Image (spheres, rainbow, N blue to C red):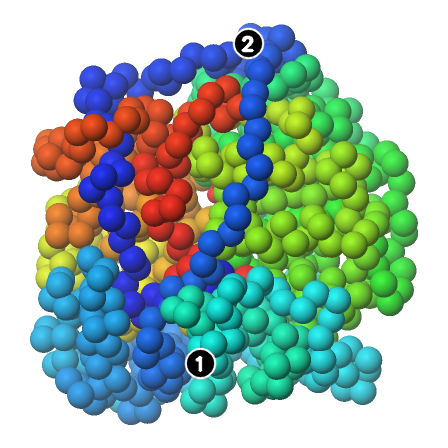
């Protein structure tokens, strides 16, 4: 998994020969061509559950691939990036001047040079700035203009420092000596040829301390044109001990009950969930439950469910809860915002309450019963808050650890007691390496956003996790995987993690977009995007809007631009320090900054109340990512809108899957998009639009060679290569 290189625009795959066959007649139906055991989630159909059967085949875990794609010249770009002031955290960008950053230098600025570098570095990419014209001309003057806007906004982020810990504690020592290695030398596997290339010290080159988005003190090592992440432990072994110490300590979450149980209302379409088709495959699936009462949870859990405002199960909960309660492994795929988190947390907690757990107490080595892993820091934090909510009043202690925060802080949280460990992959492996976490007691392993956790970026790390000393074998633990998208190939990889008799639950179209999101695709050329964006945002007014762009740099640029346009905006991406990321999210959540410009780091899982709009300023590389992005709105029965700028210069490869997604979600499909989709039809391609755009079925039912984007695995773009989030 490489560090983000979204300073360069994301690599577009060579789609031409991998676009799924376009079958227009399938689009309008919206029905699933595969009717295997698909039943509405409504109560009348529930009894079918146990009778569902499927024979299946499994295949092994494919080997990991290159972890990154860092281009030459990265180091320079980094330095330039790091000299850019971060945005005034939570402030209108317009309040910031750029006297200390490259923007003020106009056309000779680092920003523009970097853009050029991007072009040079990425000449083989079909989305380099040079081909698309970039922003230079139009923006230089604006950049200069911005520098006139006066003073740099003051930094409002609360620096954690070391205040919460004893500076002389062992954990501070750990913090200080973490380069000395641990049980597992590398958080990410070294690729062959590693060490032959230059060493690039992430974030530290300029000494700016900017970044903070990777696990603690990691660095990118470039070798043979490939890159991978290196833990500090490894760095220490190689004698390279450079790197800024991460000192950020996130503020503790509120302790009062009202805050713990704060929630937003389900929307008008919540009841429509009952009509969604649900498919369960695998042997001897337990029947779905219809009510929380049927789950037979303990009183404390029921109280917490009530306090959380849950009165009715969502479909994924109806099916998943009894499956998990029955001790079965599960792969569950349900639309964004439909309650997957509670679907795994509640039965796990119920088990823990029933079986009894080791009461939380201070111990140097904690042995959690449950480990939950998610790909981004913000998401894992959110899951932790949910775990804390549902375990309120019980003796179960949940702990969260993630990169970009002080390692000593993570350790201090853990040693106080840990039954449920919520972690991003990198930090998890660091902590295991430090022997603060023992795995012998793990009974539940949850991979949220499982397709992401098993793809080429995190897959090797997850493999390492399950083969860690002490980790119970898959036969001895319960493994649960959840996501809104599940490419077929990733489903097959999952076999290594799951018992062979795992159950597969698909709620609605696997990989399909939430129907509560009204999707609009506009054809907007590169040069017109900003103007269009401003026009839309002015119409939207103060309604909360997430704007997705392709690169970190563009996120900064667009956020700055919007602030200049007097639209209060903040941004989140992998180059921002963790405290800035959290501040930005906080300001967006509370409505202080109603516009959040984000890279795909914010595409998955984030559950923010009242996000009414998602704008894809740049479309993502894959249709899966599109589905996740637009799923930040229209959650839990609420409605939302997604507007996407389709640039025919660069987005044609998405035309077919987009048409499919729109049709399946019963959205209008623009004629021009259909035309492009037809024109990008590739004769001789063996797939069908239905079968390849979405892995609509449990892959054990049949063989397929494509993932959801319609690319072969070897060419599927891997966003983790471009931006690393844990
Ligand atoms: N049964 C329920 N009743 C009311 N609200 C619910 C219920 N289940 C979940 N929610 C709420 O719905 C929202 C979305 O849930 P959650 O974040 O778990 O969705 P998700 O399926 O994991 O989405 P994503 O695919 O984007 O990660 C949360 O605010 C959650 O508290």
Residue at image position (69%, 31%) is 499
Q: Earlier in the sequence, mark 1 or mark 2?
A: 2
Horizontal side, residue 524 vs residue 32: left or right = left
Horizontal side, residue 150 vs residue 172: left or right = left
Which of discs 1 and 2 lies nearer the camera? The answer is 1
Q: Is residue 471 above or below residue 303?
A: below
Residue at image position (81%, 51%) is 470
Horizontal side, residue 696 vs residue 407: left or right = left
Is label 1 in a helix, a strand or a loop? Answer: loop
Q: Is residue 397 visible?
A: no
Q: Residue 716 location in percent, x, y?
A: 36, 46
Which image quadrant: the C terminus?
bottom right
Query: Label 2 crowding class (10 Å Cα cut-off): few <14, some 14-19, many 20+?
Result: some
Residue 642 falls in which quadrant of the image?
top left
Is label 2 in a helix, a strand or a loop? Answer: helix
Residue at image position (80%, 65%) is 436
Horizontal side, residue 447 vs residue 100: left or right = right
Q: Residue 455 location in percent, x, y?
A: 49, 48
Identify which residue, 5 or 526, lies in the foreground. 5
Identify which residue, 699 or 307, lies in the foreground. 699
Q: Which residue is mark 1?
A: 198
Q: CA distance from mark 1 to mark 2?
A: 60 Å
Ligand 1 contact, mark 2 (Cβ < 8 Å): no
Residue at image position (58%, 85%) is 240
Q: Which residue is mark 2?
A: 45
Q: Is residue 128 visible?
A: yes
Q: Is residue 648 above or below residue 217?
A: above
Q: Is residue 552 above or below residue 42?
A: below
Residue 417 falls in which quadrant of the image?
bottom right
């Amino acid at each position: 998994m490489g560090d983000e290189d979204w300073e360069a625009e994301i690599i577009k795959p060579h789609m031409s020969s991998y676009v799924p066959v376009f079958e227009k007649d399938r689009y309008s139906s919206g029905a699933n061509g595969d009717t295997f055991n698909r039943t509405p989630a409504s109560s009348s159909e529930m009894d079918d559950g146990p009778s569902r059967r499927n024979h299946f085949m499994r295949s092994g875990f494919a080997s990991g691939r290159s972890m990154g794609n860092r281009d030459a010249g990265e180091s320079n770009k980094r330095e330039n990036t790091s000299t850019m002031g971060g945005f005034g955290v939570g402030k209108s960008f317009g309040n910031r001047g750029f006297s200390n950053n490259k923007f003020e230098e106009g056309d000779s600025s680092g920003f523009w040079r970097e853009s050029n570098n991007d072009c040079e570095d990425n000449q083989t990419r079909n989305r380099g700035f040079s081909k698309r014209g970039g922003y230079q001309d139009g923006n230089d003057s604006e950049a200069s203009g911005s520098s006139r806007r006066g003073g740099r906004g003051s930094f409002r982020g609360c620096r954690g420092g070391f205040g919460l810990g004893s500076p002389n504690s062992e954990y501070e020592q750990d913090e200080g000596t973490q380069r000395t290695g641990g049980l597992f030398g590398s958080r990410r596997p070294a690729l062959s040829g590693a060490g032959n290339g230059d060493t690039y010290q992430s974030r530290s080159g300029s000494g700016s301390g900017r970044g903070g988005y990777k696990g603690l003190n990691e660095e990118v090592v470039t070798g043979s044109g490939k890159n991978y992440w290196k833990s500090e432990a490894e760095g220490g072994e190689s004698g390279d001990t450079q790197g800024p110490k991460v000192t950020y300590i996130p503020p503790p979450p509120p302790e009062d009950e009202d805050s713990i149980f704060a929630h937003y209302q389900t929307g008008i379409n919540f009841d429509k969930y009952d009509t969604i088709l649900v498919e369960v495959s695998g042997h001897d699936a337990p029947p779905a439950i219809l009510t929380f009462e049927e789950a037979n949870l303990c009183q404390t859990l029921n109280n917490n469910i009530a306090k959380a405002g849950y009165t009715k199960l969502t479909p994924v909960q109806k099916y998943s809860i009894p499956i998990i309660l029955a001790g079965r492994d599960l792969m569950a795929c349900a639309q964004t915002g439909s309650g997957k988190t509670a679907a795994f947390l509640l039965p796990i907690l119920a088990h823990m309450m029933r079986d009894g757990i080791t009461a939380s107490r201070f111990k140097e080595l904690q042995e959690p019963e449950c480990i939950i892993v998610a790909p981004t820091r913000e998401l894992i934090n959110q899951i932790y808050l949910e775990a804390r909510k549902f375990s309120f009043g019980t003796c179960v202690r949940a702990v969260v650890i993630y990169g970009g925060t002080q390692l000593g802080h993570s350790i201090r949280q853990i040693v106080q007691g840990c039954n449920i460990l919520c972690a991003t992959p990198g930090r998890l492996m660091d902590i295991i390496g430090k022997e603060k976490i023992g795995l012998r007691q793990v009974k539940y392993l949850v991979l949220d956003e499982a397709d992401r956790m098993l793809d080429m970026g995190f897959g090797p790390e997850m493999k390492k996790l399950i083969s860690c000393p002490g980790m119970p074998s898959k036969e001895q633990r319960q493994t649960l995987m959840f996501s809104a998208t599940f490419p077929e190939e990733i489903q097959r990889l999952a076999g290594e993690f799951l018992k062979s008799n795992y159950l597969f639950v698909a709620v609605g179209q696997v990989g399909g977009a939430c129907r509560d999101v009204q999707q609009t695709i506009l054809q907007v050329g590169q040069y017109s995007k900003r103007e269009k964006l401003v026009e839309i945002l002015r119409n939207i007014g103060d309604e909360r809007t997430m704007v997705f762009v392709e690169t970190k740099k563009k996120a900064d640029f667009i956020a700055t631009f919007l602030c200049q346009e007097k639209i209060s905006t903040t941004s989140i991406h992998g180059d921002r320090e963790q405290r800035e990321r959290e501040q930005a999210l906080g300001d967006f959540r509370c409505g202080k900054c109603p516009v959040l410009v984000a890279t795909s780091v914010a595409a998955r899982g984030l559950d923010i109340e009242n996000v009414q709009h998602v704008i894809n300023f740049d479309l993502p590389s894959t249709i899966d990512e599109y589905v996740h992005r637009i799923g930040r709105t229209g959650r839990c029965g609420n409605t939302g809108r997604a507007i996407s700028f389709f640039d025919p210069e660069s987005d044609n490869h998405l035309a077919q899957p987009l048409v499919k997604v729109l049709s399946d979600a019963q959205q209008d499909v623009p004629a021009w998009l259909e035309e492009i989709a037809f024109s990008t039809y590739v004769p001789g391609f063996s797939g069908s639009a239905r079968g390849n755009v979405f892995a609509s079925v449990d892959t054990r039912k049949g063989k397929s060679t494509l993932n959801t984007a319609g690319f072969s695995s070897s060419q599927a773009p891997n966003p983790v290569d471009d931006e690393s989030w844990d």
